[in-house]
């Protein structure tokens, strides 16, 4: 699994392809609003996107299995 903690003061968008079982860091951004926007855009059927803060806490997820 990709590192879930964002750099200090940022939010990290992590994408997970549930079909191929791979994951990657899509982006590190300054605001939760921007991170949610990216997550919504990247997610879909069999692709989930999660938003984590610099403590590794998940604040949002989007997409379906």
Image (tube, helix red, strand yellow):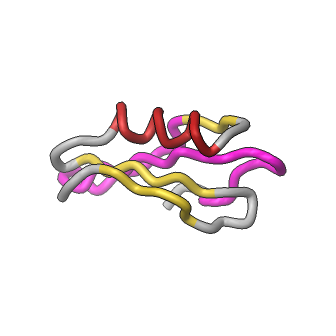
Q: Does residue 55 appear to the left or right of 57 in the view shown?
A: right
Rendered residue at 34%/51% (across/down): 62
Q: Is 12 contained in the magenta span?
A: yes
Q: Position of residue 6 (x, y in %)?
A: 70, 51
Rendered residue at 27%/50% (across/down): 63
Q: Does residue 50 appear to the left or right of 11 in the view shown?
A: left
Q: How many numbered discs sit on the rendered protein?
A: 0
Q: Give the range drawn in magenta.
A: 4-26
Rendered residue at 24%/56% (across/down): 18
Rendered residue at 26%/47% (across/down): 47
Q: Looking at the figure, which quarter contains the C terminus? A: bottom left
Q: Residue furthest right?
A: 8
Q: Position of residue 9 (x, y in %)?
A: 81, 48
Between 31 and 1, which is closer to the camera in this rendering? Answer: 31
Dividing the picture into quadrants, the one containing residue 10 is top right
Residue 47, placed above or below residue 60: above
Q: Is 16 contained in the magenta span?
A: yes
Q: Position of residue 7 (x, y in %)?
A: 77, 48
Q: Where is residue 14 in the image (x, y as percent from the top left)?
A: 49, 48
Q: Does residue 50 appear to the left or right of 41 in the view shown?
A: right
Q: Does residue 28 appear to the left or right of 35 in the view shown?
A: right
Residue 30, placed above or below residue 50: above
């Amino acid at each position: 699994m990709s590192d879930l903690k964002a750099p200090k003061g940022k939010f990290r968008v992590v994408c997970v392809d549930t079909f191929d079982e791979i994951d990657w860091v899509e982006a590190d951004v300054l605001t939760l609003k921007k991170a949610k926007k990216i997550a919504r855009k990247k997610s879909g059927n069999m692709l989930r996107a999660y938003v984590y803060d610099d403590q590794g806490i998940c604040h949002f997820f989007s997409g379906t299995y």
